[in-house]
């Protein structure tokens, strides 16, 4: 019985997000992309706001497209997430505490981010899929 549930869950995961979820996430990402472009001039670090806007635009592209374009957008996001993890870890090595609690920047939290998000992100960026799962379009 447990194996049947596992097989059903694995099949559902292989299908990816439902269209409703993809369109909702895509619409929110597109809104934030446009919003951040307009808000960039009012921030202390406009390049960060523009970088976030670009990331949101890539996320929206991945949500609204299929095939090769979606795969490229997902690979870009994986590489960006890995790069963010590396930058986070390096910044914490120079000026962070070793352990600072769950919600505060620290070397340990940077390592966790890199392990749980960055490494899978770079695997996806390189291979176009997560290990053991089909790509974004099956």
Image (spheres, grey):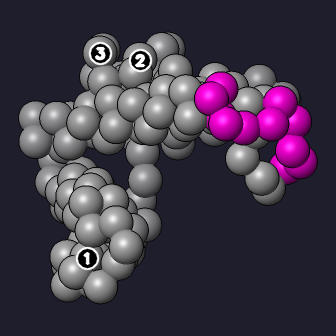
Residue on which disc 1 sits: 40
Q: Mark 2 or mark 1: which comes first in sequence?
A: 1
Estimate the spatial distance between the alpha carbons at disc 2 and disc 1, rounded to whole Å: 31 Å
Disc 1 crowd rating (10 Å Cα; few below 14, some 14-19, many 20+) is: some
* Quarter of the C terminus within the rendering: top left
Magenta span: 92-102
Q: Are marks 2 and 3 in contact (CB under 8 Å)?
A: yes
SS category of the residue bearing label 1: helix
Q: Is residue 37 visible?
A: yes
Estimate the spatial distance between the alpha carbons at disc 2 and disc 3, rounded to whole Å: 5 Å
**Residue 88 found in image quarter:** top right
Q: Nearer the viewer, residue 132 or 43?
A: 43
Between circles 1 and 3, the one closer to the viewer is: 1
Residue on which disc 2 sits: 123
* 88 vs 47: above or below: above
**Residue displayed at 40% across by 21% down:** 122
In magenta segment, residue 32: no
Q: Is residue 116 visible?
A: no
**Residue displayed at 26% across by 32% down:** 75
What is the x, y in percent for residue 117?
56, 33
Q: Are marks 1 and 3 in contact (CB under 8 Å)?
A: no
Q: Mark 1 or mark 3: which comes first in sequence?
A: 1
Disc 2 crowd rating (10 Å Cα; few below 14, some 14-19, many 20+) is: some
**Residue displayed at 72% across by 38% down:** 96
Residue on which disc 3 sits: 126
């Amino acid at each position: 019985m447990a194996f049947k549930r596992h097989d059903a869950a694995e099949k559902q995961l292989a299908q990816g997000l439902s269209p409703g979820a993809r369109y909702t996430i895509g619409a929110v990402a597109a809104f934030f992309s446009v919003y951040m472009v307009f808000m960039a001039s009012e921030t202390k670090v406009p390049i960060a706001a523009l970088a976030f806007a670009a990331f949101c635009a890539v996320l929206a592209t991945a949500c609204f497209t299929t095939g090769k374009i979606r795969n490229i957008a997902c690979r870009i996001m994986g590489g960006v997430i890995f790069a963010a993890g590396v930058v986070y870890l390096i910044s914490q090595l120079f000026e962070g505490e070793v352990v600072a609690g769950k919600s505060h920047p620290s070397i340990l939290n940077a390592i966790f981010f890199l392990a749980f998000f960055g490494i899978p992100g770079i695997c996806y960026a390189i291979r176009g899929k997560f290990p053991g799962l089909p790509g974004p379009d099956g």
